[in-house]
Image (cartoon, rainbow, N blue to C red):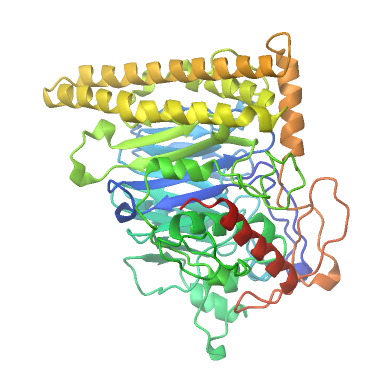
Amino acid sequence: MRRRVMSLLPLLALLLAAAVVHPVAACTSFIVGSAASVDGSVLIARNDDGEGAVSPSSLVYHPAREGPALLRANLNNLTLTLPAPGFAYWALPAGPLADADKGTNTTGEAAGWNEAGVAVSATESIYNSAAALAADPPNEDTGIIEDVIPSILLPQATSARHGAKLLGEAVSKHGAGEAFGVLIADREEVWYLETASGHHWLAQRVPPDTFFVSANQGRFQEVDLDDEAATLSSPGLLKHAIRSGLWDPASGRPFNFFSAFMRDGVHDTNYSYPRVCLLQGMWGHFCGQELRSPALGCRNVVPKPCDNMLRQPVFLKPQPRKLSAQDVMAAMRNHFEGSRHDPYTLQHPEEPFRPIALLRTGMGHVTRLRPLAGGVPDGLSIITYTAMSTPKLSPFIPLYKGLPGDVLPPELTAAEYRKPDRVSLFWKARRLQALVFQDWPALAPAAAQAIVDWEAKVEAQDRPAMEARYTAAWQAGDAAGATQELVSFTSAALQEAGQLLEGLAEAAAWQLGLPGMPSDDWLLERLEEAAEMYAFEPTSDDPPPPSCHHRHHPRRRGDKRPRPCADDSEGEGGSASRSSYEAAGASVLEALHEAATE
């Protein structure tokens, strides 16, 4: 995700005068098709990684409306009129973006689901190449940005495909103010959309028997644009690529979306590659350009460098088994634990590999859209397991589609920016995290395990019992009784989760030798210090040196050292500092060798 405007000034910007919105914050996304999950559910997940750790997420409900609605973005000057009617929807805003004095709506919604059974998560921050942006500049001033995407789609989308089409049409019409990927799902299928440039885009249906991961870099590669059942794209995408010199049909190479439109630099080998390769190794046994059998996994494999995204499959079948929501939760909590790239256990904030789990994650979710064939009542058809801060040290709470919007619990709605409280789950989790980051090796393992154990109890006992009572009431025609079961379950789960976090925080304070629970000022200071120390920011504001062509290289905050140059050539991954790619790629495989789950 993004929460700050940064400038990109590539050499090719001799043709490009506009500045570009670029992420300081970034996310990790995970999609599982219906035939790749254990129960036929579609799963979409994302960690919404913001700036710092004191800007809370919350849950909001928008009732259905009969008339049109005005939507104003907060981070640029986009203004839209949403058509009538509008579906009711639930959303998870990320941070205090709305400004009532300016008349802006409560946008900044990072994920959500609507009454029509469509779920959206936005966005995965990606980067288009400077050549692609020079040929088709972004519309930073009034273009589509993540600030508004769920707020546009959830009131309108009747299906995942419809949502992808709506978003693509909006990008074609208004332009994109930044590069992004967006997850859109219903109970039968899931689509992922990537922007190619200012007005061009591609959306693909994730094959049902596969999973897909993205980590702040474009992932689509070769694609059949004539396959309308599985692909949607901007009008004239191929012609634009040819006319702009981004793809040459005479080269003999097939059209490759990644090669034509995506940035691929030295920095990506540490920032993006490791997460993709790790998760593909863990859940697909794809080990550095080699697909391993389930029996062998990625252990004891001779490392082959994870040094080229063009060699990493876009979609993979899970191995050795299908995936559950809990498997995806584990993925979203990963920080290369058990390997030499674990920045927290080894207390190494300068670790070059960017982990999946970050302190600055404001919200993490795993949304489960259950199969139509399962026959579950509509109110139970979507479950959004939601962690109201970094999932590593915050429990995933199951929030159902049928949760009534007029009685949302204060544990999910009370949190305010930089105002710690004793009610919201966000601040209870942040209090624990501030303490744990004072001595991660001593405090984190037990706390994290206690949270996972509590989730397992809810999943094995509490949730099935509630669903049985809900279904019985629903089948008896007692809609009010069914709803009350859901309200009572959610309230009890939140109270238990809050008590768990409070107990873990008290234990952590005792283990640290503190005289009691620290003050709110202490909490804010420690959170900001830890979030700054373990920021893992992807890019800098600085333009690349002229000798580096049009590549934009990242800089850690405060790092003034020059960055190496990189070639941006097409084809098999280019030739950007190949030794750097290989060194980083080999380390990814070493991490898999040390830590991957079989």
Q: Name the residue located 47 percent from the left edge and 27 percent from the top edge.
A: 59
In-image side of 158 versus 257 (left or right): left
Residue positioned 63% across, 45% down in the render: 2
Q: Quadrant of residue 568?
A: bottom right
Coordinates of residue 439 in the picture (x, y in percent): 71, 28
Where residue 187 sits in the image (x, y, percent)? 29, 47
Look at 25% across and 24% down and name the residue there.
465
Judging depth in this view, the residue of 202 and 219 nearest the camera is 219
Say how many tags the image has. 0
- Where residue 186 appears, as percent x and y from the top left, is 33, 47
Q: Looking at the image, is 93 positioned above or below residue 232?
A: above
Up the image or down, 441 lies above or below 573; here it is: above
| In front of the other: 85 or 21 | 21
Q: Quadrant of residue 77?
A: top right
Residue 372 at x, y percent in the picture: 22, 45
- Which quadrant of the figure has residue 464? top left
25 or 173, which is in the foreground?
25
Residue 53 shows up from this direction: no
543, above or below 39, in the image: below
Point 85% across, 70% down: residue: 546
